[in-house]
Image (cartoon, helix red, strand yellow):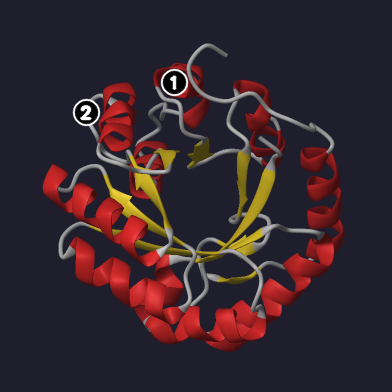
Amino acid sequence: MTPIVQVSLDLTSVPEALETAHMAMRAGVDWLEAGTPLIIAEGMNGVRALRAEFPTTPIVADLKTMDGGWLEAELMAKAGANLVVVMGQAHRETVELVARAGRDLGIKVMGDNLGMSDMVAGARLLEDAGCDYVIHHIAYDLRTVLKEQGKPFPSPLDQLRDVVHAVKVPVQAVGGLTIEQAIETPKYGAPLVVIGAPLAIDAKAFRNAGGDVEDVLRRICERVHAYGDVPTGKGH
């Protein structure tokens, strides 16, 4: 699979999200993500605004669905999302309903294993339930609290190879990665590279980060795209 760079628009207003999205597209980003803070603050209007501004760009709606799977998938699809996120911690029925909605509505489904007691088994469950992609995700709050307590916290890289080898669908690694680590996830067989805080987004304030973000993003895209085809899934 050709590696993909996705920028997470974890902002709280449509104007800031569009400004960052334009910068990201100039830099060579492939997918735009309507992050959870944007959806909470602006609802589906944030997704609609991105779709209107970027009519041909794949858009991920990170609503983190836990219930009401069909309805939420339908709302996001009608707003213009190409991909939606459902949580593995939800009932399996919810995951299956989102996957069914994805097939019926022509969108893709990303299953997120955040908080699952066995993240490798969780990835298999998400694939078996019909998800098109697996997000291997270490929670922001978990990392923040453990850091405040002076305790070590897990990295997505700890089990990334195990997750990749457990499923056939493409995998994305999220949560606490440095820029360099994110760039290197295709080496683990995870071709979907997410860039957000702390590069493009100020994580504490959920606003644009300072500095020449566009130039940094451009160099990230060049490096990720240079991988060429990345073998994914079982057997690699």
| Left/right of residue 199 with respect to residue 206 in the rendered view | right
Task: Determine if residue 9 is in view.
Answer: no
Task: Return the mark for residue 133.
Answer: none
Give the residue displayed 33% in from the left and 42% down from the top.
142
Give the quadrant of residue 226: top right
* Kind of residue sitting beneath label 1: Gln
Task: Return the mark for residue 159.
Answer: 1
The residue closer to the viewer here, 129 or 87, is: 129
Helix, strand or loop under label 2? loop
Q: CA distance from mark 1 to mark 2?
A: 13 Å
Looking at this view, name the residue that lies furthest to the front.
104
Task: Determine if residue 132 is in view.
Answer: yes
Helix, strand or loop under label 1? loop
- Work out whether mark 1 precedes mark 2 in sequence or the reverse, and give the earlier one: 2
Callout 1 crowding tier (Cα within 10 Å): few <14, some 14–19, many ≥20: some
| Left/right of residue 107 with respect to residue 56 in the rendered view | left
Circles 1 and 2: CB distance less than 8 Å?
Answer: no
Give the residue displayed 52% in from the left and 41% down from the top.
176
* Placement of the C terminus among the 4 image quadrants: top right
Give the residue displayed 84% in from the left and 55% down from the top.
218
Up-down: is 31 above or below 179?
below
